[in-house]
Amino acid sequence: MRDRIDADRKQIIQEALLSANAGCLLKSVLLFGLPIVGIGGFFVYLGLSKIHDQARLNDVAISVPATIVSSEVRRSTTKTGPEVGSTSTSYWADIKFTYEYEGKEQNSNRVWPVGEGGSAANIRAIVERYPPDAQVIAFVDSEDPGMAFLEKRWSQMPYLSVSIGCLPAVFVAALGVLVAGWKRPGIAMLSGLGVGVVVIFLSVLTGDHYLRNVPASERVWWMWLVLAGSCALALGPLVAVIKARQLNRLYREATEAAQSG
C-alpha cells in the first residue's frame, strides 16, 4: 500500500513538473522577493556601519569635562495591532549636555556611541545618574568635535542587525532555487553556494569583529548563538539545492517516459 501511495505521489509531482514554467515561477519569486532582500540588505548595511562607528568612537574618543543641561525620560507609544490596547512603548534617555573642545563650546545629547532604548527602569536609572547641572566626563569624537557621548559602551544591536538582515536573502534564495532549480540544477547549485558563501562571510566577519573588539566583560552569551545561527542560515539555500536536484531527477524520468511513450 505504501509503495502505491509513493508511486501516486511521484506521478503527481512529475506531472506538475512537466506542466510548470520554471521561468515564470522564478520571476514571481524575484518580483516579491527582491524588495524583501533590499530591506534585509539595508539592515546589513546599517549594522556594519554602526559596528564600524561604535568601534571607532570607543577607540578615538577623547575625554573632556561636561555639564548636564537637562535630563529626562522620553517615551514613544505605537499601535501594534487592530485590537484595542495593542500598543508598544519604547523609552530613551534625553540628556543634553555642553562641553568645550579646542576653545569652542559644543553640545550633544548622545549617551552612548551607538544609541538605543531600553526598559523604563533602565532608562530612569540612566537619567538619575545625570541630573541637571551635574559636572561629568564626556567623550568627544576627535574627528568630529561636534559629536560627543557620555558613556563608552558596546551595544549588541548592530551585530544582531547583520544577522537579521541575512534572513531575507537566505529565504528568497532558497525559494528561488527550489522553484526553478529543478530544471537547471547546475545554476541552482552555483546560486545556492554563492548565497551561502556570502552569508558565512558576513557571519564570520561579524563574529571576528565581535571577538576582537568587544571586551569580554561586555559580551553577552546569546550573541554567540546569534552568530552561530547566522552561519547555519547558509544551509538554507544548500538544502534547497539538494531538493532541486531530487526534483530534477524526477523531471528527467518523466521527460524520458513521455518521449519513449
Image (cartoon, rainbow, N blue to C red):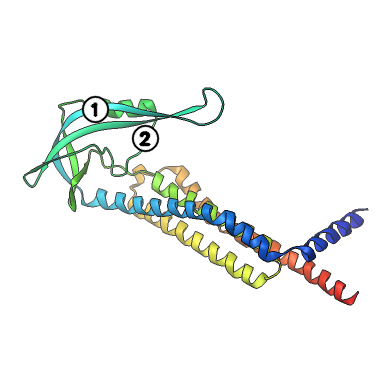
Q: Position of residue 196 (x, y in %)?
A: 55, 62
Q: Position of residue 103 (x, y in %)?
A: 6, 45
Q: Which mark is residue 117?
A: 2
> Is residue 113 left or right of 223 when viewed as pictured?
left
Q: Nearer the viewer, residue 122 or 36?
A: 36
Q: Amino acid at mark 1?
A: Ser
CA separation, marks 1 and 2?
A: 15 Å
State the image quarter where residue 119 is shown: top left
Q: Secondary structure at mark 2?
A: loop
Q: Compared with residue 106, is residue 40 higher up or lower down, i.e. above or below?
A: below
Q: Secondary structure at mark 1?
A: strand
Q: Position of residue 182 (x, y in %)?
A: 71, 66
Q: Which mark is residue 71?
A: 1
Q: Amino acid at mark 2?
A: Gly
In the displayed image of the protein, which residue is found farthest to the left? Answer: 103
Q: Compared with residue 3, is residue 149 higher up or lower down, i.e. above or below?
A: above
> Is residue 90 left or right of 152 when viewed as pictured?
right
Q: Is residue 97 visible?
A: yes
In the displayed image of the protein, which residue is found farthest to the bottom? Answer: 260
Q: Residue at x 27, y 37 (%)?
A: 111
Q: Position of residue 58 (x, y in %)?
A: 26, 48
Q: Is residue 235 visible?
A: no
Q: Count neighbours of disc 2 (C-alpha within 10 A) and say few if under 14, some if 14 to 19, many if 20 or more.
A: few
